[in-house]
């Protein structure tokens, strides 16, 4: 594994094989093996890039891409609740030890936003907060808890983990318009203004030590790095695991459009129609300056399908392995672009880990969350 205590790392490593892959089935195993043989070629990588470029240049095509996750996500609708100030309406025990669900009355969202909070093992000690963002489905139950990677990565760490929910396909951005399918998204305002005012209120009983970290995977990684770059005075570190950080490059714009379409939303409601100034402004790969003075950890695998990936996807739907490969290839390309931009800007503090082998799959992210936490927080305060 890469030494995350170094100032910067671009080393590759072999795959650390997670435990207990799903039980195999012969037919899907053969299919996954065939997919690996095809997609592991250099020609396939060129075709992926070409296909992504062509699709994003043809709105008539990408607007017809059918939603993938529409049956798995929560679709909050815009309410007419005019809250004057953000307020904690209710706080209840949730699904796991030390996990609570907080119900936040949000003026910017005009609805109650549910947030899952994992409390620290020693609640009497001053503690940092990690705002941890979900992937594209982002339903009412955070994927970090649903997939067990939070427990694997941070269960014994002294940290308050704050996981907003019901953010399907949101990019964790302030949208220019409400969407009929996924509702109202004003996540930048909620995450940087409303929610911290509640989480850091001494009346909650939480012992906050004044340090905020933001992190996430996939869509959540893109949102975390973008928010950190836009609000460098607010966050004290950022973790991005398999994210796309450009909104204007061939791969970055293509993946952004895919995120928006796969939950059935209209991309024009996010940043406006076409390559608007807002699209360009939020491209961290061309505007990395906000990351100059905060610790940053980035991870991506190179999307080479391994034997473990074949085992992992055996028994799953036929689109899972090709989709996971394309997503991780896009993440890998985008992560390299962001790292290059930071280096060109004279930045050397970032820790970047590229893994040889691995696709876009939850099973990789528990260990990487721990590595990111060690790099951006523990190494800074030790």
Image (cartoon, rainbow, N blue to C red):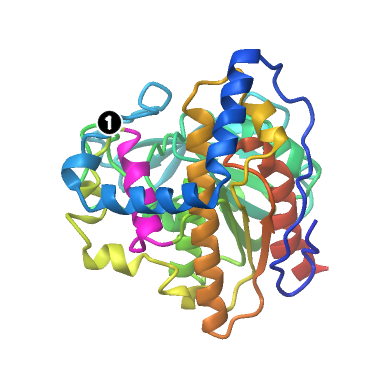
Task: Please determine whether, in this image, residue 269 is positioned above or below residue 347.
Answer: above
For the C terminus, which image quadrant? bottom right
Which residue position is annotated with label 1?
77
Magenta segment: does it hold 262?
Answer: yes
In the rendered image, residue 17, in percent from the top left (x then y), is placed at 78, 38
Question: Magenta residues?
Answer: 246-263
- Looking at the rendering, which quadrant does residue 346 occupy? bottom right
Image point (20%, 48%), residue name: 58
- In the depicted view, which residue is nearer to us: 122 or 74? 74
Q: Secondary structure at mark 1?
A: loop
Image point (64%, 45%), residue name: 161
In the rendered image, residue 84, in percent from the top left (x then y), is placed at 30, 47
Magenta segment: does it hold 256?
Answer: yes
Name the chief secondary structure element in magenta: helix
- In the depicted view, which residue is nearer to us: 164 or 25? 25
Task: Please determine whether, in this image, residue 182 is positioned above or below residue 47.
Answer: above
Whether residue 165 can be seen here: yes
Image point (42%, 34%), residue name: 166
Task: Please determine whether, in this image, residue 340 is positioned above or below residue 127.
Answer: below
Image point (80%, 56%), residue name: 1
Number of residues whose C-alpha sits closer than 10 Å to that of mark 1, classed few (under 14), some (14–19) or many (20 or more): some
Whether residue 159 can be seen here: no
- In the depicted view, which residue is nearer to us: 50 or 14? 50
Left or right of 279 on screen, residue 346? right
Give the tally of numbered discs: 1
In the rendered image, residue 132, in percent from the top left (x then y), is placed at 57, 47
In the rendered image, residue 219, in percent from the top left (x then y), is placed at 46, 47
- In the depicted view, which residue is nearer to us: 293 or 123? 293
Task: Please determine whether, in this image, residue 22 is positioned above or below residue 121.
Answer: above
């Amino acid at each position: 594994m890469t030494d995350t205590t170094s100032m910067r790392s671009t080393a590759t490593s072999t795959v650390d094989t997670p435990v207990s892959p799903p039980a195999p089935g012969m037919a899907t195993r053969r299919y996954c093996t065939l997919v690996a043989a095809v997609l592991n070629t250099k020609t396939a990588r060129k075709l992926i890039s070409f296909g992504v470029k062509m699709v994003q240049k043809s709105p008539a095509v990408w607007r017809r891409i059918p939603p993938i996750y529409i049956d798995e996500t929560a679709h909050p609708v815009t309410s007419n609740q005019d809250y004057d100030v953000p307020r904690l309406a209710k706080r209840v025990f949730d699904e796991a030890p030390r996990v609570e669900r907080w119900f936040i009355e949000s003026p910017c969202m005009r609805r109650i936003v549910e947030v899952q909070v994992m409390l620290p093992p020693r609640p009497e000690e001053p503690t940092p907060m990690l705002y941890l963002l979900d992937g594209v489905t982002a339903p009412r139950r955070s994927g970090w808890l649903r997939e067990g990677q939070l427990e694997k990565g941070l269960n014994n760490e002294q940290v308050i983990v704050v996981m907003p929910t019901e953010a399907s396909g949101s990019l964790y951005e302030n949208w220019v318009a409400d969407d009929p399918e996924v509702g109202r998204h004003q996540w930048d305002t909620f995450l940087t203004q409303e929610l911290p005012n509640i989480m850091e209120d001494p009346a909650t009983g939480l012992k906050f030590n004044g340090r905020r970290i933001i992190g996430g995977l996939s869509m959540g990684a893109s949102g975390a790095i973008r928010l950190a770059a836009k609000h460098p005075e607010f966050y004290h570190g950022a973790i991005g695991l398999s994210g796309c950080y450009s909104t204007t490059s061939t791969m970055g714009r293509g993946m952004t459009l895919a995120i928006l379409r796969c939950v059935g939303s209209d991309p024009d409601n996010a940043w406006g129609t076409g390559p608007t100034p807002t699209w360009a402004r939020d491209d961290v790969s061309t505007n990395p300056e906000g990351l100059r003075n905060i610790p940053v950890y980035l991870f991506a695998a190179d999307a080479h399908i391994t034997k473990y990936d074949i085992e992992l996807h055996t028994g799953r739907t036929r689109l899972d392995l090709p989709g996971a490969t394309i997503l991780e290839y896009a993440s890998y390309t985008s992560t390299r672009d962001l790292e290059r931009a930071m280096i060109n800007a004279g930045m050397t503090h970032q820790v970047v880990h590229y893994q040889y082998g691995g696709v876009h799959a939850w099973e990789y992210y528990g260990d990487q969350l721990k590595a990111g936490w060690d790099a951006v927080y523990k190494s800074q305060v030790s």
